[in-house]
Amino acid sequence: MTTAPAQAGWRFRQPSVIPGFGLTLGFSLAYLTLIILIPLSGLIWRSAALGWTDFWALATDRRTLTALKISFGTAFIAAAVNVVFGSLVAWVLVRYRFPGRRVVDAMVDLPFALPTAVAGIALTTLYAPKGWLGQLLMPLGIKVAYTPLGIVVALVFIGLPFVVRTVQPIMEEIDKEVEEAAATLGASRFQIITRVLLPGLAPAIITGFSLAFARGVGEYGSVIFIAGNLPYKSEIAPLLIVIRLEEYNYPAATAIAAIMLGLSFIMLLVINLVQTWSRKRYG
Amino acid sequence: MEVRVVNVRKEFERFPALHDVSLDIKSGELIALLGPSGSGKTTLLRLIAGLERPTKGAIFFGEEDASQKSIQERNVGFVFQHYALFRHMTVADNIGFGLKVRHGAARPPAHEIRRRASELLDLVQLSGLEKRYPAQLSGGQRQRVALARAMAIEPKVLLLDEPFGALDAQVRRELRRWLRDIHDRTGHTTVFVTHDQEEALELADRVVVMSQGRIEQVGSADEIYDTPNSPFVYSFIGESSSLPVKVDNGEVWIADRPIGLSAPHAPPGEAVLCFRPHDVDLLDGCSGCIAGTVAASRRVAGTRRVELEVGGERQRVEIELPVDHPAAQKSRVAFRPRRWKLFPAG
């Protein structure tokens, strides 16, 4: 067939000078199917073997619910912390020239590169009751290792580069003249940040948040070392899946995974919609 | 508000951008800072705004020493070449921004800010666009919003940094006339920076010509054009030709010939003769004139421009000839400048 889609009447492509729309779209779809869609549908397929009542019973099991709550809750808090401090780090890297800036810039990427288990063990050693930081926090009544707080600490570590690396390029694009304009109009330093700079950065910050959050929800390696893994207290959902697997309880494992998948999808979709909206407004 | 710049010097990392500049701007005046890039005109404007601090010297708004005040306290309206609008705010919010960030009793109520914004939109002829975002406006419209935003705070001085530099020629001419109009209606003391002499001469009450961090001349369009006080102003404003000459006995000489211009007050020695290419008398014979061989000729609209090689040194000068003048390649042309000026050589 040589008839162009345009003649057939369905035109969803933008005309482009580079040919090969059909080829590239076909490849993208095949690739996504192979890499993402087939494994995920396998997951749903296996959990569907459970039947509704069993699935519901498993989903509403108190252990499952607490594990999910801990996973999503800690990931949310960690992403929120990263948004604040990650933006601050990005600001310092973009706006100031100081000796060692390149080194600090490179250090931001370390959590990407480090095996997560190493990070987990290192953090546990630091924050354990007898560790360097743990023994300082102990008298204050703050327990980090083996509590949900420890999970948050690990996820903050893992998620930092996501926020810094998404916000940094947008910050670099900020026109200094916009700040100067605000200053001549009488805006104080604080007003310039809250009313002029942050709204412009919002789409990038939301992206950074969603990336850090998604990463936090799925994180396993670093968390299991510092969390202590006490059921109903500091047990994360990915660990619960592994536990079920070790019990050869495949339907239960896939059911929890399917719930995580559904929740993650909904949350990322919402974040994406918020982002599209803000991009349209501020773009 | 009257603005006085007193002996201001500005250095950027030991590199001087302005040397000892003084300038008096009268209240309600429209002043142009004109000069090539690197002449310090934008630096001077930013110093008045408070976006830079002078290394030495002071800037007075009326009797107040403004150099001791922060940008926020100076209450100046600044318009940037690239608009610098807040792109996440609507046009109305952009204009109202300066009022909204005020504190306590100084901040007008919301409806008053809205009323003021739409009033200013009327003034800049953009009524009805309150709800648009800057991305939805053309360049000329954005610059008008920027001007409305600057005027909303009722500034003591309005400062514009190459306000039409990013716009195309058509819009530029239109906005130029419109800015003059707004200025005449509102009477703000206004300083604008430009490197376009046509813009400066047409728009401003007085033009400040700057070069290499110094003010070369301040005056009305007529003064600047008719009586330039340096070879730089001569060549920067309008067309000009210059020739190295010698002054002796109150006469101007080129090589060993007097050219029929007397300069009784000029000091004897080397000098530079400047004149306008169109301001010359053509002569037939040559006893006391400048004579040269035509080296090149171009047709420029209603006249012909010829380049002459003059004297033994073959100095090139440009003059204008009527289109029907018979001068051709290699023929000799004799002329004498009608209006001219001598500057010391060097």
Image: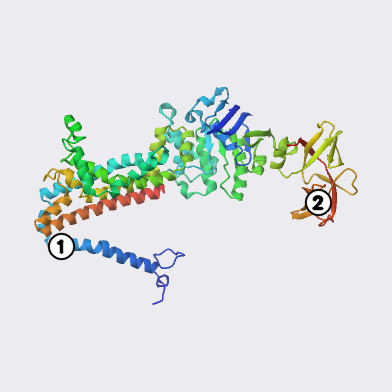
- Residue A280 lies, with reference to residue B45, above or below; the image says below
Label 1: which residue? A46
- State left or right for residue B39 relative to residue A190: right
The percent position of residue A53, horizontal first and vertical second, equals 10, 58
Which residue of the protein is positioned furthest toward the top in this rendering? B63
Amino acid type of the residue that numbered disc 2 sits on in the rendered structure = Leu
Could you tell me how far apart the alpha carbons at marks 1 and 2 are, in whole angstroms?
94 Å
Q: Residues within 10 Å of mark 1 (few under 14, many from 20)?
A: some
Q: Secondary structure at mark 1?
A: helix
Say whether residue A73 is visible: no
Which mark, residue B321? 2
State the image coordinates of residue B93 (x, y, percent, origin top left).
44, 40
Q: Is disc 2 placed on a helix, strand or loop?
A: strand
**Residue B28 x %, y %:** 61, 31
Q: Residue at x 10, y 56 (%)?
A: A246
Residue B315 x, y percent position in the rendering: 78, 47
The three-letter code of the residue at mark 1 reads Arg
Of B132 and B111, the residue lying toward us: B132
Q: Is residue A253 above or below residue B243?
A: below
**The residue marked by circle 1 belongs to what chain?**
A
